[in-house]
Amino acid sequence: MVSHHKEAKETLRFSGVAASRGIAIGPAYRYFRTFLFAEDRELAVSEVGPEIERFDAAIAKARQEIEKVRRVSEQKVGAAVSSIFEAQRMMVSDEFILSTIRQRIKQELKPAAYVVDMEFSAHQRKLEASDNPMMRERADDIEDIKQRLLRYLLDRKKWLSKIEVPSILVADILTPADAILFARSSMLGFAIDGGGVTSHVAILARSLGIPAILALHAAAEHIETGDMLILDGERGELIVCPDAETLRGYEQEQSIVHGSGVEQSGPIIEEDAPVARTTDGHATTLLMNLEFGSEVAIIEAERLSDAAARSNGKKQLGLGLVRTEHFLLLHDEFPTEEEQNALYKDLADRFYPAPITLRTFDVGGDKVLSGTYREDNPFLGWRGLRISLDEPDLFLAQLRAILRASARGNVKIMFPMVTTVDELERALAFVKEAKSTLQSNGERFDEHLPVGIMIEVPSAAIMAESFVPLVDYFSIGSNDLTQYTLAVDRGNDLISTLYQELHPAVLRLIKLTVDAGKRGGKPVSICGELGSYPLATPLLVGMGIAEISVAPSSVRALATRLRLLNHAECKELTSSILASSVSPEDVKREILQFLSERQLIDLFSESTLRPGSGARMIKK
Ligand code: PEP
Ligand code: MG
């Protein structure tokens, strides 16, 4: 974000897009990537042969280096995410591109470096002109290959990708290859001026499990190697040379976010069930959110589930939201039914007998797929279930793939972006059709597989009562519910201070949903970011939300908070807030007072008292 302001004398704050969660504290390592350009000149005819040989040698070297990066990446983040580099390798093996370059060297008598620069820049421009933000971000991948080739052809030094002391890397641009190579040394996190949430470098940061902020615009030029930094990947804030108090606050929060310290305060979940209980015995089930496609994320969630296993070794901590569309962000095509089934089945087996909730593809909105149409208002457009209903073959393939993974009885289906009852009825008809196809093929699946919906559009919350008879459960998507209720784009940093999940309008819609679920005997969970927002915990308990699903890194802290609360008191607080608050400030004030009366303020309010926390960037 462009705006930055001096807070104390030498403290600077920058806000950008929180691309990978977590908090890093440490000195800056300023990385300068040089951008090479090739000069034009005319070759003598006798130079053409050697020039083409030099070009071929550069290509061979590029392939070797990309292969090396891919291997390191596979070790670090697994095969799925490393396919990013497969696309780069294909580009340097593309005979059409290579022979065009050779031909131009020969026919136009131009140096190889110059032709490489021209050809690859032309591809980049095409991508940059795309309406699709994901395609635009792929232009950075081409820049990486182009610069690699220019470096060989212009005989420049190798880039240095090593940090000697544990540091936060700051740069104006960072390529996926840089990120992987730096991850081998002591990179605590990275903050870069460019990039977007769907860029490969963002995906890599999440897979590596290191905090990252992108789109800081002009932060890097203000930072020097050695400057003390706080990289707040929870809120997208970079603080340069923080004062002692801010630093202390963040050090405390870092231990909460990363789970240390909280561990000693009790088991993640309690002996008899995957729950955390309040002081008066009210149980809330804990679950985890998973961004599908990243092996590292799966391993992290699995590890936590193992840690929370019963003494007989059976896993209890399951997945309340699996964002299946994240797998698509790494691939340009929809996976086949077989490919999907293999992935879903693997996940179901790894978590068995804990439940896994597979949300059908939520593409569109901010999760754009290449080849989709340009829309003026993508968040109000062709998104989520709307796309699935319009593309029956894709939808049925995904439903069959999920159903076939459900035979052991621990899989649930969830539909995103449900707006009307009619949509849900149509979606359920597809589930029926998928089941009958499998039945006639003699395939096994869980006949009673629970089917639920996200409540993330105000119309669905208001009409929750009408959805009750059709579903097995509701799950509140507070991220979208907030943006649609308050008409605030969740990814637009210009208006991020208006994005208030604790706005009473949002809370009332959540309450409507919980009450409708209770009356109809259907469980209501929450899987939006509100679940991990410390100040919201008393309200979620007070409203009687049965299950809370949060990122694995937030589970322990959530469990600890739940155990410190009293259900009856939270209920009272919630009733009072719902009855009289008119603004998010009112809500926060009342919660803070409630917490401070109980000496709980430190554990609950850390993240909300800090200035600038209105900007909670929650896109993944
Ligand atoms: C939500 O909207 O709250 C949600 C959990 O879904 P997503 O963030 O994937 O849109
Ligand atoms: Mg959503």
Image (cartoon, rainbow, N blue to C red):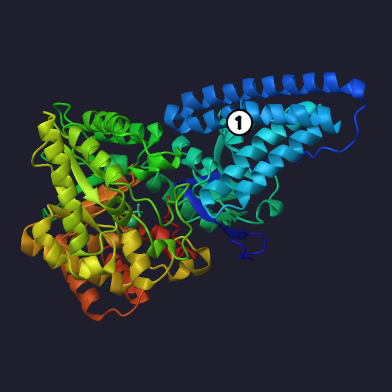
| Residue 12 picture location, percent across and down | 63, 59
Q: Quadrant of residue 593?
A: bottom left
- The amino acid at mark 1 is Met
Name the residue that disc number 1 marks.
Answer: 91
* Quadrant holding the N terminus: bottom right
Give the vertical position of 587 relative to 409 (above or below): below
**Mark 1: few/some/many CA within 10 Å (<14, 14-19, 20+):** some
Viewer-side residue, 572 vs 530: 530
Query: Which residue sits at x=11%, y=61%?
Result: 468
Viewer-side residue, 334 vs 271: 334
Please tell me in which quarter of the rendered image ligand 2 is found. bottom left
Viewer-side residue, 148 vs 568: 148
Query: Which residue sits at x=48%, y=25%?
Result: 74
Residue 216 seen from this side: yes
Q: Is residue 313 left or right of residue 536?
A: left
Q: Quadrant of residue 44?
A: top right
| Residue 503 picture location, percent across and down | 33, 72
| Residue 582 picture location, percent across and down | 31, 80
Give the vertical position of 462 relative to 558 (above or below): below
Q: Secondary structure at mark 1?
A: helix
